[in-house]
Image: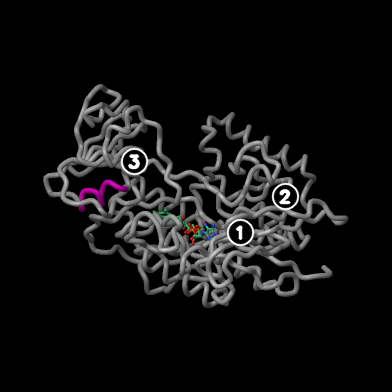
Amino acid sequence: MSKRLRVAVVGAGAAGLCAARHVLALQHAFDPPVVYELTAQVGGTWVYEERVGCYDNGHPIHSSMYRNLRTNLPKEVMMFPDFPFDPLLPSFLPHQEVLRYLQSYSQHYGVTPHIRFETAVEEVKPVTMETGEGKVTWEVTSSGGRYGRRTETFDAVFICTGHYSDPYLPSIPGLEHFKDATHSIPVSGAVSLLEMALIGYHGRAVCKTALKETSAAAVVILSHGKPPLAFPLPPQVRQAPPVRQVLKDGGVEFGDGSVTHPQVLLLCTGYSFSYPFLSGASLGLQVEPHLVSPLYKQLLPPAWPSLFIIGICKIICPFPHFHTQVQFALAVLEGTVLLPSCAEMEAEVRREADRKLMEGVQPRHLLKMDSDQWGYYRTLASMGGFSPLPPVIQSLYEEVWRQRRRDPQKYRQINYRLVTDTQWEILELQPDRETNGERETER
Ligand code: FAD
């Protein structure tokens, strides 16, 4: 390669830190990255924010972390494979420990000095269309921070802005009649209440905290469209079918015709993908960056093989996922991976989507990977010529899911240890600790 490539990384959460760490490791091929970060610190989702609404710089609060969340993956699976957590910590961690871990990762790999804090990326667009070598240059416009409004050019851009910050609000007839219906993000602000309705399957995760935050006599109604939860719920929790409408007097009518008048209506309906700094038009896409289905190997738009969206998939092991995708993306930039033609990549994307649709996957769940993730990681590693994830990650991940299905209240009391690349063991059962207020988490 004749000249070192310049890489921009948008976001200094786990994915952005991972991207920058691997760029820095390949000094022969890449200049040190420029990492843009909206907030004043690293960690993204893992920075718990008591405030709701906006940061001092006017940007919407990014984190949707819950006050007393503990991870739903053990640290032995969750970690970046090249950077273990402190072995003295238990397997399932409070969010503060994950933040500390990410801060150490950033320091250890020398990423922190390359981060421009309080700097928001406002636009990412391709400027040099096709040069003789078929390369594209990217213009990144940012504001805030030390440099104010500024536009710089890069050879490649890693989008690492996460997807748990833009609340998805379902259209419920009459919702406007409920004063202060709110998305689940600010649940930690709930106070002594008598009745609370949680809407959406994600509400099961919010339930415990809601119970803790409400008065002892509170009733919590968990309304969702899935089969009723089979494991025992606290006596104050009632399950209900999806909401049909909100009545003029603020009453909430469920699918079975029952009506209730909760004090709080909490929409636990997940998040939308949002890339406000990428315009579908400038990328030649028919739709605004849903960018989602047209991604080759779940990370790059076929027409723009130097734009990488890291971590867009769901039901994954996020940190190992980022670790694998980032190395694959860098192998593409270095030329180790020779990408097929744009038409072939698009055809593969379509085939993949069709396969899932044929298997009965709903279009909105096309990005859920679940058990597909393991084959995906092996494919990326073999194409990119880097070490695959050790098989013990999959084996322990599957064990934890088994435990979680068996006893969702207690699976986090077990501690694990990795013995070899293929073997794990249970350390000891923790005493039956109080698990109230510890919430299931999303990935
Ligand atoms: P984020 O952490 O969201 O980071 C994105 C960063 O981009 C942020 O710092 C943000 O400020 C920055 N940014 C956004 N827009 C801009 C912009 N325009 N300009 C500059 N910077 C920008 N994963 C697990 O492995 N285990 C768990 O137990 C677990 N629990 C979770 C619980 C909850 C409640 C949630 C929401 C997620 C959980 N996850 C869990 C998944 C979690 O999302 C991932 O672990 C991971 O932190 C995602 O990292 P990310 O870098 O993709 O995104």
| Depth order, front residue of 395/365 | 365
Q: Residue furthest front?
A: 149
**Is residue 120 one of those drawn in magenta?**
no
**Secondary structure under the numbered disc 3 in the rendered image:** strand
Q: Which residue is mark 1?
A: 324
Disc 3 residue type? Leu
Image location of residue 79, percent across then percent down: 49, 64
- Taking the spot 80% from the left edge, 70% from the top edge, the residue there is 3
Q: Which mark is residue 267?
A: 3
The answer to whether mark 2 is within 8 Å of ligand 1 is no
Which stretch is magenta? 206-213
Q: The disc labelled 1 sits on which kind of residue?
A: Thr
Q: Residue furthest right?
A: 132
Pick whichever of labels 2 and 3 is earlier in the sequence.
Answer: 3
Between the C-alphas of marks 2 and 3, the distance is 36 Å
What residue is pinned by disc 2? 304
* Cα distance in 3D space between marks 3 and 1: 34 Å
Q: Position of residue 115 (x, y in %)?
A: 56, 71
Are the residues at dot 2 and dot 1 in contact (C-beta closer than 8 Å)? Answer: no
Type of secondary structure dominating the magenta stretch: helix
What is the secondary structure assignment of the residue under circle 1?
Answer: helix
Which comes before the other along the chain, label 2 or label 1?
A: 2
Figure check: 367 above or below 106: above
Going from N to C along the chain, the mark reached first, 3 or 1, is 3
| Residue 346 x/y as whole percent | 72, 39
